[in-house]
Amino acid sequence: MADLAMKHRLPTIGAEDAFSENGGLISYAGNVNFVDQFRQAAGYVNRILAGEKPGDLPIQMATKYKLTINFKVAKALGIDVPPSLSASADEVIE
């Protein structure tokens, strides 16, 4: 998808780190630690197997987010990334 967007000169955003690492402009990913996600899922499975109803379990939201900006892509698209946005990025790809 990143190649197609680049061909048509479209800025893109994805929900996984790999997106911006592979040619997307920006990625904004929640709960980037997959080990933590699997641990939380195992806890939910345990509670369901112990008899709790899935509908009674609380909804869990991401607690950590990672913003990655690919400046190579921004330059190729002629986009000036505002300093405030680049300052808040967790990772910058030069």
Image (cartoon, grey):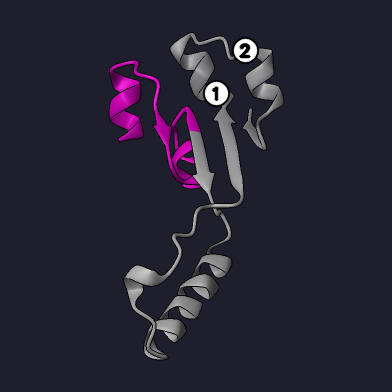
The residue identified by callout 1 is: 72
Q: Amino acid at mark 2?
A: Pro
Q: Amino acid at mark 1?
A: Lys
Dot 1 or dot 2: first in sequence order is: 1
Q: Dot 1, how many residues are within 10 Å of its Cα: few (below 14), some (14-19), or many (20+)?
A: some
Q: Residue furthest bottom?
A: 50
Q: Dot 2, how many residues are within 10 Å of its Cα: few (below 14), some (14-19), or many (20+)?
A: few
Is residue 14 a member of the stretch shown in magenta?
Answer: yes
Q: Of helix, strand and loop, which one carries label 2?
A: loop
Q: What is the magenta range?
A: 1-26
The residue identified by callout 2 is: 82
Left or right of residue 11: residue 68: right
Left or right of residue 34: residue 94: right
Q: CA distance from mark 1 to mark 2?
A: 15 Å
Q: 41 or 2, which is in the foreground?
A: 41
Q: Residue at x 50, y 53 (%)?
A: 61
Q: 29 or 23, which is in the foreground?
A: 29
